Amino acid sequence: MSNENGMSLNNRIRIAFCLVVLVPLVLTGIIFVLFLQHADPVYPVPMLRSDIWFTVIVVFVGILILTSVIAAVWIYHQIATPLAELKWAARNIRDGNLDFTIDPMSNIREVNELSEDFEEMRLRLKESAEEKLEGDKESKELISNISHDLRTPITAIKGYALGLIEGVATTPEKQAHYIHTIYNKANDMDKLIDELTIYSRLDTNRIPYTFARLNVSDYFGDCIEDLRVDLQAQDIGLVYQNDVADDVMMIADAEQLKRAVNNVVSNAVKYMDKQPAMIHVRLRDVGDFIQVEFEDNGKGIAQRDLVRIFDRFYRTDASRNSRVGGSGIGLSIVKKILEDHEGKVWATSKEGVGTTIYFVLRKYVPAEADAQESE
Ligand SMILES: Nc1ncnc2c1ncn2[C@@H]1O[C@H](COP(=O)(O)OP(=O)(O)OP(=O)(O)O)[C@@H](O)[C@H]1O
Ligand SMILES: [Mg+2]
């Protein structure tokens, strides 16, 4: 790197100093010696002659000025050029233009380091400016999605309420149907607002996680038992397989992880299209991690959609066009929760066959944690 190749400013100044002092001395010395060799034999001690001294001093000062100028130019050139570049870069940054590069062009190590630090600062500023832009875009998208998702039930509520006011629903059954629909739509809105609140709180770190040491088998065993009751009521079979040893622990927020599990299972239920409906949950030991798999035999997800289902508000065309409601936020909450646990989530799927969602969570290793604590 240029850093290692470049000479430090200190060394450069030392060399320049030696140059300025030594070169005039040596050169003047040489000239003096030459002069002595050709001196007039009538005056064997030329040192006594004042005009010789005068010449020596003039020559010495002349050479001194020349070497000083050379040394100054040598150092100045290596500092002034990169400084001009840094000045230009600072002005660009001030004006909000971050699309340029600063090449360390000096041979002086310190100046090069400054250029490199400047370049790094520019890259970081550019990154954060891009992140901000992306964040602004997402916020706009979020607002437009929320308004769209809220408008749909509101339009329905308004329509049915108007029907009741204007007496369109003439029979008690029709009236009951209208009121029921209004209730259901209001519930949809409630759910959406709940999900959005959770998401935005998670996103802005306003839900403080309460991480605790949990026994993996106990935790997921309890989760599954809770789910089993709900699923039985909906006529969906649940098979649970646990390959993890009884004493394996993890650090997790029980409540938030449960939210992630529920979101995944509620998708499996929502996008189920077969009989008998089955959900397989498997707990696997994969070295330093545990892997939780949720496999359903629902309608599946097309390959092109798979990478996007964890994006906020992303719903596949198939589910958008179907009657099942949703706002596409469920899996983005799952992803956020898993990431905050330093885990991972991904999916595999085959259209018409089913979907598997995978969670990976790090095991808790007591020795390592204790070592860290005692550090
Ligand atoms: N198990 C599954 N089977 C088939 N498709 C699924 C499954 N899970 C998710 N998807 C697809 O991924 C999309 C995103 O899922 P996500 O849970 O984020 O949103 P949603 O279920 O549409 O709405 P929400 O969860 O906010 O009510 C869904 O719209 C659906 O198309
Ligand atoms: Mg969902």
Image (cartoon, grey):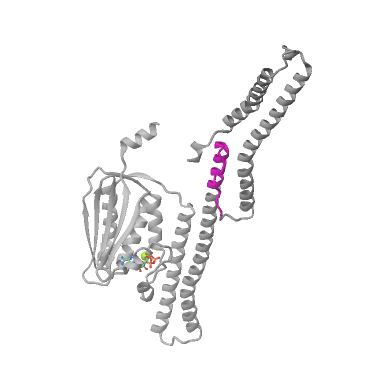
Left or right, 350 with respect to 107, comes to left
Residue at image location 63% in from the left, 50% down from the top: 88
Residue 246 versus residue 306 in the image, above or below? above
- Magenta stretch: includes residue 110: yes
Q: Position of residue 155 (x, y in %)?
A: 49, 77
Q: Quadrant of residue 37?
A: top right
- Magenta stretch: includes residue 105: yes
Residue at image location 27% in from the left, 64% down from the top: 231
Q: Position of residue 169 (x, y in %)?
A: 44, 85
Q: Quadrant of residue 46?
A: top right
Quarter in which the C terminus is drawn:
top left
Q: Position of residue 15 (x, y in %)?
A: 59, 29
Pick the residue in front: 154 or 233. 154
Q: Position of residue 117 (x, y in %)?
A: 54, 43
Residue 31 versus residue 227 in the image, above or below? above
Point out the stretch of residues depicted in magenta.
Answer: 100-120
The extreme front residue here reads: 41
Pick the residue in front: 161 or 338. 338
Where ligand 1 lies, by image quadrant?
bottom left
Residue at image location 39% in from the left, 71% down from the top: 325
Q: How many marks?
A: 0
